[in-house]
Image: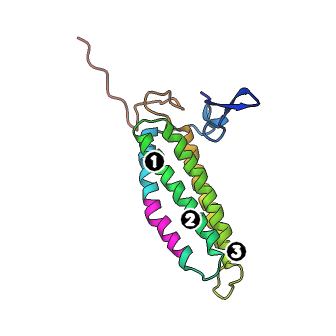
Amino acid sequence: MRRYNAVTFGGHNWHMANTLTDPPFAANPPVKLNVNAKILGLVLAILAVIGAVFIGLLEGLISVFAFAGGFQLIWGLGVIVGLIAYILAAIGGFQMYNLNRDGKRLVIYGIALGLLGALISLIGNIVAYSGIYALGYSAAGAIVGFIFALIIYGILYYLVVISRFPGEAPVAPSYGGGYGGTPPPPPPSV
């Protein structure tokens, strides 16, 4: 089911689909997994709070105190964008856990902002470390870190998009008796 946002342009109401929150593959995903949106929301909310507290604050302190030059501002801007992403994802995750469907939208926007923050931090790292070869640091570490973040954010985005709330039709039909084993025998007839 595609949601449309009403946009007024030139006196006419245009209805546009939000491709980020409702991509074309959402109805028929290539990898069919039955992901419970309520449980995924709780897991994402907890991970986002942990990420905001530990990773966000730690990166923020490192970016502020790392160099006396002016390039740590770019790195710091990436950290601030990342913190906002963690906060959005945490709020959206808790909304998903409380069966609020708008939480998925907030988590997706948090993931997109997190990726943007990682890109800004990458640029700040490359610029800040570009003239310091005596420390043995190269830009390859920052690039590998960004590629790792891109993969993680892509997997999380895919899981959020294909997740279903209780009562919605599952993505893939379930066969068998659940999580392994054989189903219990039918009750005896009287």
Element on which disc 1 rests: helix
Q: Is residue 109 left or right of residue 187?
A: right
**Dot 3, crowdedness within 10 Å: few (<14), some or many (≥20)?**
some
Residue 123, placed above or below residue 70: above
Marks 1 and 3 close (CB-CB < 8 Å): no
Q: Considering the image in quadrants, where does the C terminus appear?
A: top left
State the CA–CA distance, disc 1 to disc 3: 33 Å
Q: Which residue is mark 3?
A: 127
Q: Which residue is mark 2?
A: 79
Residue pictured at 45% horizontal, 44% vertical: 41
The region drawn magenta spans: 50-62
Sequence-first tag of 2 and 1: 2
- What predominant SS class does the magenta segment belong to? helix
Residue pictured at 56% horizontal, 65% vertical: 79
Sequence-first tag of 1 and 3: 1
Check disc 3 and give the amino acid type.
Val
* Residue 114, horizontal then vertical, whole percent: 58, 56
Sequence-first tag of 2 and 3: 2
Element on which disc 3 rests: helix
Residue at far top of view? 190
Q: Which residue is mark 1?
A: 91
Residue 69, placed above or below residue 7: below
* Residue 117, horizontal then vertical, whole percent: 61, 60
Q: Is residue 73 left or right of residue 57?
A: right
Check disc 1 and give the amino acid type.
Ile
**Dot 2, crowdedness within 10 Å: few (<14), some or many (≥20)?**
many
Out of 155 and 178, give the one closest to the viewer.
155
Check disc 2 and give the amino acid type.
Val
Out of 173 and 5, give the one closest to the viewer.
5
**Dot 1, crowdedness within 10 Å: few (<14), some or many (≥20)?**
many
State the CA–CA distance, disc 2 to disc 1: 18 Å
* Residue 148, horizontal then vertical, whole percent: 60, 61
